[in-house]
Amino acid sequence: MKKLVRRWWRRTIVSAFTLSFLVFGVAAAPQGGHREHQATDSIRPVQNNAGDARLLLGFADRSGIYLANVRVFIKDHNGNQVTQLVTEGPWLDLGMTPGVYHVVAVFEGAPQELRNVRLAERATTTMVLYWDLKMPSTEMMARAQAAKAV
């Protein structure tokens, strides 16, 4: 029963993230969506070609607070680094070559991993990574404001 409730809650959150993205246009950042981007042939801007895949990643604390300044590392199925970047907001939207990827996201030293992320041709794959930071939301918001000021 507990597993069923957790699964339902996770689906509800993913649906809410996706809906907010579609309705309000919430994205990781304007014009490009990231900093420190070291691209290879596998990654393209969000305005991707008809055959490209799209990876939409969301970042949040389990309490419901969205997270920014998440360091993201993406490797292909051979272990080659595809990109490394820092998000400016709670969403990261990437146009990529279809394939299988390994995603590691690190927020304040705490890593979250997604293994075997399959990106299909002409499809969007949406995933949300959650951290259990156990800190008051006021402290989390103060840290986010301080990071924006830098």
Image (cartoon, rainbow, N blue to C red):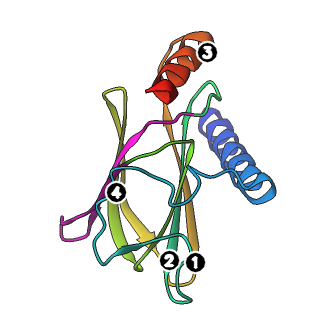
Instruction: Locate the C terminus by quadrant.
Output: top left
Instruction: Locate the N terminus by quadrant.
Output: top right
* CA distance separating discs 2 and 1: 5 Å
* CA distance separating discs 2 and 4: 18 Å
Give the number of the disc on residue 137: 3
Q: Which residue is mark 1?
A: 123
Does the stretch in magenta take in 73?
yes
Give the number of the disc on residue 53: 2
Question: Which residue is rendered at x = 55% and y = 11% of the image?
Answer: 139
* Discs 2/4, front: 4
* Discs 1/3, front: 3
Question: Which residue is rendered at x = 40% and y = 50% of the image?
Answer: 35
Q: Which residue is mark 4?
A: 37
Is the residue marked by circle 4 packed among few (<14), some (14-19), or many (20+) residues within 10 Å? some
Q: Amino acid at mark 2?
A: Ala
Is the residue marked by circle 3 packed among few (<14), some (14-19), or many (20+) residues within 10 Å? some
